[in-house]
Image: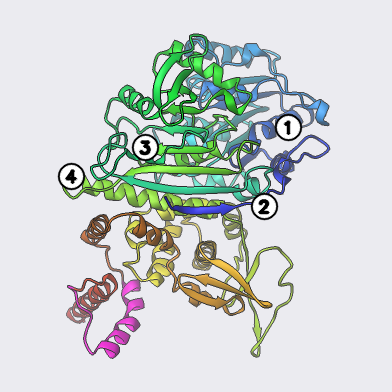
């Protein structure tokens, strides 16, 4: 199987080193912003967000007048990340020592937990840990002023949204509006699986943002050297033998020698058999024969049919609470790679789940949420001495012409590929872009190497407002996520629309929708950064002699000759589809193309005007007008532009 993405890291160890206060690189970066009333920390899984919160919370408790700290997590299991932690022995001025009585991430009813939450506000206790649900329920009828001089920390902040039905979002909004509380929001992924923003722009603008990216984290590891993201396509059921193959798709892709988390499909998805327990049994059958289940730990001991060795398997799909608690407790105490080999999960083992020895995150079925994909990949990207490569594999059903759900399957496949495109943007090293100035034909190359990975581009526009600068600095990947989830963009990316239309019309349109407060100049600066960053990260830079060249979309260009107009002629998202075409059959590609062509993208005046020079060039070259029935999608689009312009001219003449 060919990976769509393969990223190599330098193993610098930088992200794991600690300073004199015991802080790692990300934590030190976050702590510098400790005086902010509203702080948003965006950092990858395993970067140390939990401890970063402890450092900041203790600083606020001891030196900034904050009287209490409330930490809210999405699931009870994640509450363990905020248990008693020794910080003084590593150089900090105090330890994190919450009273176990006010750790509400324990078994029990929400009624009793809400009562404990309200009691906590009346005591001298300093720290409370609870779930998002407890926080929501506690706010029914609670006066927000009770949270004056309190720090509210929300872990996995992407669970919040401005949707009117999102109670957590409403709670947050009221805390900000009606109390003096401080807020720390933490997330490993700020992307949502839908188009609803996490915060409204005016509320988000109140937050000081600390962003620590995936490349910084993974490049600074000691052991992990590379990360692969690949897709494997199958027909029928993933656990059944393919009609033209000797084994099932799962058998083909599952390597029992790698520590693996298998996420089976949601029972509501097309890939699911609707019998989740049977699917677990099928996976066990693929692995081998069940010897026994440890009564104390719940671990399944399976004799491999390939090698004969005993595999230790954890079943997190089982709904029996007693069984689930038993195996979950065992996994929390795992101390070495040999303690567990494979974990089978459905809704669990995503965010906040820590199994550093995991080498392979194998996910069956399309995942519509970019957040979920990033969280799952994060399970395999912990740094551990047992691995130098981490792998994410998504088993996705191929569209079948005989299946009435072919449109759903095509959409799922396209969205899976766009998710990988986004991950490539997230995981690749960052570049700094600057305008390349000219003066009477002489290029100015001052400070070319002033910042590592700086590329100078002719015609490039820098942001002039602080608002645009903040978006480019902190929100570029979030904006790319919105672009890659846009329906029009999804249909345009495979190359049936001119790159200039994608880059200069569709992308600015989405930017305006997300940031309606930006003026045209700010939109253009953000647009250029999005397009240039996407194109460069999908390209390769090579050195020949003392010159650097960049290979992008088939062009091989001297890096000193790059102009924004040249970059605007490149589809920044086509690379993954080119790889996809080598991974699926001609029939599947045809189905994808037919699906895209069957849904027309509305023509705009801007696109038609942009296409007009190409239409004239086509006529001069061929002696004919572009054909509406052409099999070439670009020729067909030019023909549609001709029809559109004729109709526009006709309407104009009628009204003169």
Q: Pointer 1: what residue?
A: 55
Residue 204, percent from left and from top: 55, 45
Q: Quadrant of the C terminus?
A: bottom left
Q: Mark 3 sits on what residue? A: 250
Q: Which residue is mark 4?
A: 403
Disc assigned to residue 10 = 2
Distance between the alpha carbons at the discs numbered 3 and 1? 44 Å
Distance Cα–Cα, label 2 vs label 4 = 46 Å
Magenta segment? 605-629
Calculate the distance from the C-alpha at mark 1 to the C-alpha at mark 2: 29 Å
Circles 1 and 4: CB atoms closer than 8 Å: no
Q: Is residue 427 visible?
A: yes
- Sort mark 2 into few (<14), some (14-19) or many (20+) by Cα contacts within 10 Å: some
Q: Mark 1, residues whose alpha carbon is within 10 Å: few (<14), some, or many (≥20)?
A: many
Mark closer to the observer (3, 4): 3
Foreground pick, 25 / 143 = 25
């Amino acid at each position: 199987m060919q990976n769509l993405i393969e990223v190599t890291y330098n193993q610098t160890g930088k992200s794991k080193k600690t300073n004199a206060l015991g802080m790692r690189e990300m934590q030190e970066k976050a702590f510098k912003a400790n005086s902010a009333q509203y702080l948003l920390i965006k950092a990858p899984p395993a970067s140390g967000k939990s401890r970063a919160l402890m450092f900041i919370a203790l600083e606020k408790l001891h030196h900034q007048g904050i009287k209490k700290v409330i930490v809210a997590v999405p699931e009870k299991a994640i509450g363990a990340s905020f248990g008693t932690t020794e910080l003084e022995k590593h150089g900090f001025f105090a330890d994190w020592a919450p009273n176990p009585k006010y750790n509400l991430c324990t078994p029990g009813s929400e009624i009793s937990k809400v009562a404990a939450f309200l009691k906590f506000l009346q005591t001298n206790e300093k720290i409370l840990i609870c779930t998002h649900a407890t926080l929501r329920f506690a706010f029914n009828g609670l006066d927000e002023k009770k949270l004056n001089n309190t720090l509210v920390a929300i872990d996995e902040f992407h669970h919040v949204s401005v949707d009117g039905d999102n109670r957590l979002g409403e709670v947050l909004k009221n805390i900000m509006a009606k109390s003096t509380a401080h807020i720390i929001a933490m997330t490993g992924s700020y992307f949502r699986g839908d188009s609803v923003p996490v915060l409204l722009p005016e509320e988000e603008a109140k937050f000081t943002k600390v962003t620590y990216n995936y490349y910084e984290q993974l490049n600074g590891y000691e052991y992990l050297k590379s990360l692969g993201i690949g897709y494997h396509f199958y027909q029928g059921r993933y656990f059944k033998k393919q009609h033209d193959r000797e084994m099932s798709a799962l058998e083909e892709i599952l390597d029992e020698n790698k520590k693996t988390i298998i996420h089976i499909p949601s029972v509501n998805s097309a890939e699911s058999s609707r019998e989740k327990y049977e699917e677990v049994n099928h996976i066990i059958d693929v692995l081998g024969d069940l010897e026994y289940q440890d009564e104390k730990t719940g671990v399944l001991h399976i004799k491999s049919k390939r090698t004969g060795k005993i595999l230790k398997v954890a079943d997190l799909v089982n709904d029996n609470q007693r069984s689930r608690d038993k195996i979950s407790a065992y996994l929390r105490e795992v101390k070495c790679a040999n303690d567990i080999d494979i974990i089978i999960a459905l809704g669990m083992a995503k965010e906040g789940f820590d199994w550093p020895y995991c080498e392979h995150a194998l996910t069956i079925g399309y995942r519509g949420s970019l957040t979920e994909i990033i969280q799952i990949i994060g399970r395999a990207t912990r740094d551990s001495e047992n691995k130098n490569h981490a792998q994410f594999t998504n088993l996705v059903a191929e569209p079948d012409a005989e299946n009435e759900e072919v449109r759903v399957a095509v959409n799922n496949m396209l969205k899976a590929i766009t998710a990988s495109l986004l991950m490539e943007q997230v995981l690749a090293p960052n570049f700094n872009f600057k305008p390349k100035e000219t003066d009477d034909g002489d290029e100015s190359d001052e400070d070319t190497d002033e910042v590592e990975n700086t590329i100078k581009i002719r015609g490039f526009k820098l942001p002039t407002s602080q608002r645009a600068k903040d978006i480019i600095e902190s929100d570029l990947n979030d904006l790319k996520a919105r672009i890659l989830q846009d329906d029009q963009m999804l249909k345009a990316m495979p190359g049936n629309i001119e790159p200039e239309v994608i880059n200069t019309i569709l992308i600015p349109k989405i930017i305006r929708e997300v940031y309606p407060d930006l003026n045209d100049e700010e939109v253009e600066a953000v647009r250029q950064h999005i397009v240039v960053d996407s194109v460069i990260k999908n390209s390769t830079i090579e050195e020949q002699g003392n010159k650097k060249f960049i290979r992008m979309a088939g062009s091989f260009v001297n890096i000193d000759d790059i102009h924004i107009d040249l970059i605007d002629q490149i589809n920044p998202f086509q690379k993954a589809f080119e790889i996809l075409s080598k991974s699926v059959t001609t029939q599947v590609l045809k189905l994808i193309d037919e699906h895209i062509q069957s849904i027309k993208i509305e023509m705009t005046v801007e696109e038609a005007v942009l296409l007009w020079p190409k239409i004239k060039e086509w006529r001069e070259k061929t002696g004919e007008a572009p054909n509406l029935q052409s099999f070439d999608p670009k020729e067909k689009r030019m023909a549609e532009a001709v029809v559109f312009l004729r109709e526009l001219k006709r309407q104009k003449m009628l009204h003169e």
